[in-house]
Every structure is written in C-alpha cells, then in structure tokens.
Amino acid sequence: MTSSAPVIEVTVFGLSAGAVFGLLALGLVLIYRTTGVLNFAHWAIGLLSMVGYALLAKTGMPPALAAVLSLGVAVFFGALAYRLVFRRLNRANQLIVILVSIGLATLLSSLAQMILGFEAFTAIPPWLPVDDLRIGRVNVRSTEIFTAVTAIVVAFGFLVWFRASRTGRALRAVAQNREAAALAGIDEVRHSTIAWGIGSALAGLALLMVLPHSGGEQGAVITTFDLTPFGTLLIPAFGAALVGGLVNLPMALAGGFMFGLARELLVLAPKPWSDMRASIAAVLIVVLLLLRTERFFATRQELEALEL
C-alpha cells in the first residue's frame, strides 16, 4: 500500500503514546533530581489516582471533575511516601533505595487491588471526548490528539514554572547543592515533598490520559494486569528519563516522544524488525546506560548532591 495514511495514523498514535511516556519521565526526573530517589513506585503511586477516579466516577460525579480531583490522591501518596519512607533512607546506598521503592510499589499495587475489591475487571468511563476523526484519508481518535496536545502544554507549562517561579528555583537549588540551599534558608524537606507531590501528579495524569480511553466510547476496563506494581508504560518512561540522564527535564520529555514513535513506527517495519516492538525500549535503555548520558547534562555539584 503506497498511501501515506497508515504512516500518519501510526505517527499520531506514537506521539500520543510518547506524550504519556514524557509525562511519566518528567515526574521520574523531578523526583530523582531533587531527592536522589530512583522511584520504581512511580507507576503504583499514579495508579492510585486511577483508582480514585474509578470510585468517584461510580458516584455519578462528572468524569472530568472526577479526573481532576483524583490527581490529589497521587499528590497525597507521593508526598507521604517521601515523608514517611524516602526521607529517612541513606541515598548514598542506591541499592537500598531501589529495593525499598520496589517494595513500596508492590504495597501500593496491593492497596489498589484491595480498594477495588480484588475484582478481575473494573469498568471506568472516559473523561475526554472519544470520537473517530477523519482528516482526508487519515483516521485518528480525538483522545490521541488531545493526549499529545495536553501533555505538551502541561510539560512546557511545568518547565516554565520550574525555571521562573520562586519554588522552582528553590527546587533547582536543592538539586544542585543541598547544603548550600539549607544555608540560604531553603527548607529541603518541604521542597522535596513538593517535588514528590508534583512528580506523582504527573504520573497520575499520564495514567488518566491513557487507561480510561483504551476502550473507546464505551469506556475502559481496569484489569489485574493494569494493577501490577510497574505496568507496561514504566519501562519506556525510564528510558525517556535516561535520554536526559535522569536530570534534564526537557530531554526527558523529548525522550518520551522518541520512545513512543520508535515503538509504534516499528509496526510498519518488515519482519523481523516489527517483532522488536515490545523489546525496543529495553534495547534503547541498555544503550543509554552504556552511554552514561547524565554526564552530558549534570554538573559535578548535582552529581555529588544526588549521592548525599
């Protein structure tokens, strides 16, 4: 088939998926850059927003309002995780931090399943308009366009806030040199809690953009597979974060789109390349780890601060 329509359709879908990866990656980078925690519980914390949305939607609340309010669940549990758990860990021992975050992910995943009554299937309505749009010969779904646009707007708004606001500057100061920030009167614990709250909200938003709309106009179904501690989207999100060395926020967003496009465009590739769609994220992560991309974006002070 010589028509360009399939390429455009897959590209739009790839950009939508990449937007979700980018939002997840921004949260991962913000948390790691500010507090030195490689947060493997990121998906599980965002998942609690999804559970909150499912419960609120069942009460008859307008889905859009339920989606907005449910972001507060992720903010609460993200801030709580830092205050009660990660604040007390020695960040110089990353192995312990990673093991604790994996344990927390399992705990929160089990909590989500318990709240939903350990049901195999939980129906949830969409909160975005779900329509099939035809532009010329191209068929796209409205949620794919909305997801990509919303993610870009939210991400760039966040990046501007991070650069220009007083709180954003304080977060950068904590990331660069915790001792100097403390001497300047910046409350490290308070701002680290803010970072965890914002990062967790980005995770919740990413999940709310994709999961309720996977079934089209009829809504979607949350299965036990979706309630796993890590989910299928966390690995590409970590890969996107690694594009910026886990410290560069704009590159993490760009990495999200890169991973989304790479994964979806492989659908159009001939075999055996098309069969690599599921494993392309793992391959790219290995390459990025070998390249040690953090040395291109982080100063020596920032790298030392992450170890304290």
Image (tube, rainbow, N blue to C red):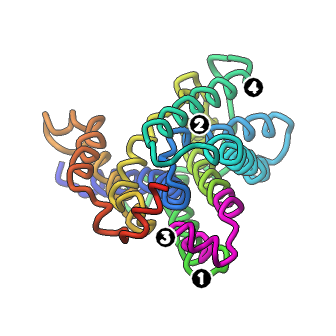
The residue identified by callout 1 is: 164
Q: Amino acid at mark 1?
A: Ala
Answer with mark 4 or mark 3, whichever residue precedes in sequence.
4
Q: Is residue 94 left or right of residue 46?
A: left
Relative height, residue 268 to residue 253 (above, below) = above
Query: Gap in Å between the C-alphas at discs 3 and 2?
Result: 28 Å
Q: Which residues are magenta?
A: 168-194
Tag in front: 2 or 4: 2
Tag in front: 4 or 3: 3
Answer with mark 3 or mark 2, whichever residue precedes in sequence.
2
Q: Amino acid at mark 2?
A: Ala
Q: Amino acid at mark 3?
A: Gln
Q: Secondary structure at mark 3?
A: helix
Tag in front: 1 or 3: 3
Relative height, residue 23 to residue 103 (above, below) = below
Classified by dominant secondary structure, the portion drawn in magenta counts as helix
Relative height, residue 49 to residue 246 (above, below) = above
Answer with mark 1 or mark 4, whichever residue precedes in sequence.
4
Disc assigned to residue 44: 2
Disc assigned to residue 176: 3
Residue 206 visible in the current orientation: yes
Query: Gap in Å between the C-alphas at discs 4 and 3?
Result: 39 Å
How far from the left and from the top, in percent, is residue 220? 61, 34
Q: Are marks 1 and 3 in contact (CB under 8 Å)?
A: no
